[in-house]
Amino acid sequence: MSSLKLNEFEKSLVQEISTISGSQELQVREILEFTFLRQLEQYIESGEISIPFIGKCRIDYEGDEFVAGAKLAKVSMNLKPSPLLLRVIGEAEDSESAIIENLLQGKIKAAFQNKLNEE
């Protein structure tokens, strides 16, 4: 499979997810690439994409422009945040973090359990 060229943020994200999850970087990268392909399919079908945990993003094509010789689409985007994102943002702004703490505790417990099972 031909891979996408990742920018520095995307490379860093793959490394961080790999480190935190214990999954190989190639596996993480492939999952992110397949997620992107699925989002492109959604755009083609409906003009919007689902961003996991974040919400739905409507993308409106407004034509093309040329930047440094490359043809790029001009688009406008409108995000409809998910209920989860709204709750987490609300907690963060209120200096609370119950959802984040519960999620992190669950991930840490699962990681410890996996390590114990490996030994």
Image (cartoon, grey):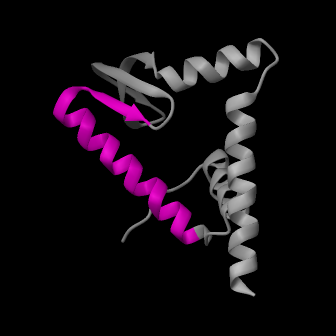
Q: Residue at x 62, y 57 (%)?
A: 14
Q: Nearer the viewer, residue 11 or 53?
A: 53
**SS majority, magenta:** helix
Residue reaching furthest to the right: 95
Q: Residue at x 56, y 53 (%)?
A: 6
Q: Residue at x 50, y 34 (%)?
A: 53
Image side of residue 95 versus residue 79, left or right: right
Q: Is residue 4 above or below residue 83?
A: below
What is the magenta range?
A: 26-51
Residue reaching furthest to the left: 45
Image side of residue 84 versus residue 35, left or right: right
Residue 4 in sight: no
Q: Residue at x 55, y 62 (%)?
A: 28
Residue 53 in sight: yes
Q: Is residue 9 above or below residue 28?
A: above
Task: Provide residue 12's location: percent of width, then percent of height.
Answer: 69, 53
State which quarter of the image contains the C terminus. bottom right
Total tally of numbered discs in the picture:
0
Residue 62 falls inside the magenta stretch: no
Q: Is residue 96 above or below residue 23?
A: above
State which quarter of the image contains the N terminus. bottom left
Q: Nearer the viewer, residue 86 or 68?
A: 86
Q: Nearer the viewer, residue 89 or 61?
A: 89
Task: Provide residue 83's location: percent of width, then percent of height.
Answer: 49, 20
Residue 59, by quadrant, is top left
Residue 72, by quadrant, is top left
